[in-house]
């Protein structure tokens, strides 16, 4: 018996799209006053922004997802408290907590506090996995959906990013490793490293009022132990331990960076305990089953939360899902291979599709099975069959239509907004929606990305076919910052080093800002070359050919 499988038929208290609609109340737009001197902006975007009023100035914890969302919160805060901004604290690197910082700061030059791992994660997202992370985030947050399809984001009203949105991140100016005690504007604060939803997560403790700002390690929805927009492994044991740190502080008020404020020591203790228990349960029961040889598919069915946790208002699956969590725990320990020999050397996609077609009795019969699955409302099965069919006949209009129908129907039936938005957006993409990068990079944004992230990101874009016979070394000398980098393409691999490795074939001398703006497409390459701002020893044409070995995100 696995977990509480005997109670597997127990329905969660909330699990229909109507319940998701009711959940929208959590995000009614408001500024909530907490105690004497804290104001929480809720419902202005995806996350909360928290203002702490000090003697002569203020502190803001978390900064919204875009300049426009940040600007709106700033107006609201300014009308309540006109004191100047002294400090910003990021609970972690995610866009919805950092990207409205410049708007919130306005003309002020605040100190910016963060845990020391934040810059690395910020840059990794910006330079290495930006393209795919953005695309999948826009699906998951439903940024292209109308208000019928988009109910809320589970942890917030909506992600306020649209075409041309600008991100205004301020780089941290003060970082720490484990903890940091500070007094800012006469307010005593203690920052603790609290890895969980992200490795750089911190929590803010105000000892005088026993108030805890818990970042994204707790919100009114099942924790997103895995996020479907894609993430490295979220260490669920560390997340649980961070919740334990919170419990043993015995907070009287908890202000999460999403959803609502928890008031009262007893309630806070109960919610924290349930939350950490849910995480430990998923972890322990997955590991237990894993050790008995169960695969992720089997575990996702077998591990079912105890009934009292299923009923908790703070564990409804409006953001994370237990089934996804089980899979991520397995993956965190065991990696991709589920242990089943049949999945070790799988057939390639086309061969499998051909075999399925044959099994169905031919192309027409497979098509009929798909239509039948849609008619019978077996949408998931329809989706799986269309995968096979469309990998053989990708432009078949009827089956594409079947797939769209299945995605729409499945999506609209979901109460988990991430699943709902993802499925519906994929349907719209098949109908022609262009899921493009919405964010306009600004010179400041690209200036702040370190060269290490830019060159490592570049290496991961090398086209192996184009570079199969190339062995070439290019030295970059940045005239304004004096940084020196070598990129050596060696038949399918680009080695990057932050120094001169050996005699280069091509030497480029350019200002770091100019180079970054060209890569970010803020400047066009041809006029930049013609303007003489890039000096090339070894031939401009040769350099352009070299750069074309790398794919460009479209
Ligand atoms: Zn967040």
Image (cartoon, grey):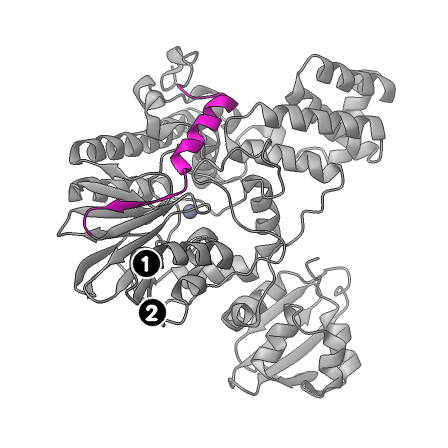
Location of the C terminus by quadrant is bottom right
Q: Position of residue 543 (x, y in %)?
A: 74, 78
Image x and y of residue 342, in percent: 62, 28
Which residue in the rendered view is the most extreme toward the left?
A: 208
Image spot of residue 3 (x, y percent): 36, 20
Q: Is residue 312 magenta?
A: no
Beta carbon of the mark 2 residue lies under 8 A of ligand 1: no
On screen, 214 above or below 200? above
Residue 315 located left or right of residue 376 = left
Please say whether residue 31 is one of the residues in the magenta stretch.
yes
Among the 4 quarters of the image, the one containing residue 138: top right
Question: Which image quadrant for residue 336?
Answer: top right
Q: Is residue 61 visible?
A: no
- Between 380 and 443, the one lying in front of the other is 443
Report the front residue among 91 and 39. Answer: 39
Q: Residue at (66%, 85%) from the top-left corner?
A: 507
In which quadrant is the N terminus drawn? top left
Q: Position of residue 65 (x, y in %)?
A: 47, 53
At mark 2, the secondary structure is loop
Distance (Cα) linking label 1 and label 2: 10 Å
- For marks 1 and 2 on the same chain, the one whose residue lies earlier in the sequence: 1
State the mark number for residue 60.
1
Q: Which mark is residue 110?
A: 2
Report the residue at 54% width, 86% height from top: 480
Residues rendered magenta in the picture: 13-36
The reply to whether discs 1 and 2 touch (Cβ–Cβ < 8 Å) is: yes
- Foreground of the two, 544 or 181: 181
Give the class, few, some or many, for how many residues have Cα within 10 Å of label 2's Cα (few <14, many ≥20).
many
């Amino acid at each position: 018996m696995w977990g509480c499988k005997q109670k597997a038929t127990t329905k969660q208290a909330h699990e229909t799209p109507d319940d998701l609609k009711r959940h929208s109340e959590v995000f009614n737009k408001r500024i909530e006053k907490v105690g004497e001197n804290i104001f929480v902006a809720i419902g202005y975007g995806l996350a909360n922004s928290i203002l702490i009023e000090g003697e002569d100035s203020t502190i803001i914890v978390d900064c919204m997802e875009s300049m426009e969302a940040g600007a709106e919160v700033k107006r609201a805060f300014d009308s309540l408290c006109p004191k100047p901004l002294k400090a910003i604290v990021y609970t972690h690197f995610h866009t919805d907590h950092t990207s409205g910082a410049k708007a919130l700061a306005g003309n002020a030059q605040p100190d910016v506090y963060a845990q020391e791992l934040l810059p690395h994660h910020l840059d990794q997202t910006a330079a290495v996995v930006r393209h795919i992370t953005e695309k999948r985030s826009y699906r998951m947050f439903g940024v292209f959906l109308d208000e019928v399809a988009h109910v809320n984001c589970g942890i917030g009203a909506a992600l306020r990013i649209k075409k041309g949105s600008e991100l205004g991140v301020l780089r941290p100016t003060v970082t720490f490793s484990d903890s940091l005690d500070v007094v800012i504007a006469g307010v005593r604060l203690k920052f603790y490293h609290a890895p969980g939803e992200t490795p750089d997560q911190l929590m803010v403790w105000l000892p005088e009022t026993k108030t805890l700002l818990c970042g994204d390690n707790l919100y009114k929805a099942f924790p997103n132990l895995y996020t479907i927009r894609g993430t490295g492994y979220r260490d669920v044991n560390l997340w649980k331990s961070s919740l334990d740190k919170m419990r043993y502080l015995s907070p009287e008020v908890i202000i999460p960076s999403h959803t609502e404020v928890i008031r009262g020591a007893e309630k806070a203790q109960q919610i924290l305990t349930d939350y950490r228990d849910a995480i430990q349960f998923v972890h322990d029961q997955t590991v237990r089953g894993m050790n008995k040889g169960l695969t992720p598919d089997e575990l996702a069915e077998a591990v079912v939360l105890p009934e009292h946790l299923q009923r908790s208002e703070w564990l409804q699956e409006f953001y994370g899902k237990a089934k996804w969590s089980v899979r991520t725990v397995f993956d965190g320990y065991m990696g991709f291979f589920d242990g089943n020999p049949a999945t070790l050397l799988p057939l390639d996609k086309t061969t499998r599709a051909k075999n399925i077609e044959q099994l169905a009795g031919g192309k027409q019969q497979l098509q009929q099975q798909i239509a039948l699955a849609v008619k019978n409302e077996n949408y998931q099965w329809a989706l799986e069959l269309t995968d096979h069919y469309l990998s053989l006949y990708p432009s078949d209009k009827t089956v594409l239509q079947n797939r769209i129908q299945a995605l729409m129907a499945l999506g609209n039936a979901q109460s988990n907004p991430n699943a709902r938005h993802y499925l519906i957006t994929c349907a719209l993409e098949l109908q022609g929606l262009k899921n493009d990068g919405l964010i306009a990079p600004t010179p400041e944004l690209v200036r702040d990305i370190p060269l290490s992230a830019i060159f490592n990101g570049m290496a991961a874009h090398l086209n192996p076919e184009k570079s199969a016979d190339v062995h070439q070394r290019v030295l970059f000398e940045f005239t304004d910052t004096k940084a020196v980098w070598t990129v050596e393409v060696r038949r399918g691999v680009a080695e990057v080093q932050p120094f001169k490795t050996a005699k280069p074939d091509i030497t480029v001398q350019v200002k770091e800002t100019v180079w970054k703006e060209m890569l970010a497409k803020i400047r066009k390459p041809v006029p930049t070359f013609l303007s003489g701002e890039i000096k090339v020893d070894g031939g401009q044409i040769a350099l352009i050919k070299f750069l074309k070995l790398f794919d460009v995100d479209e």
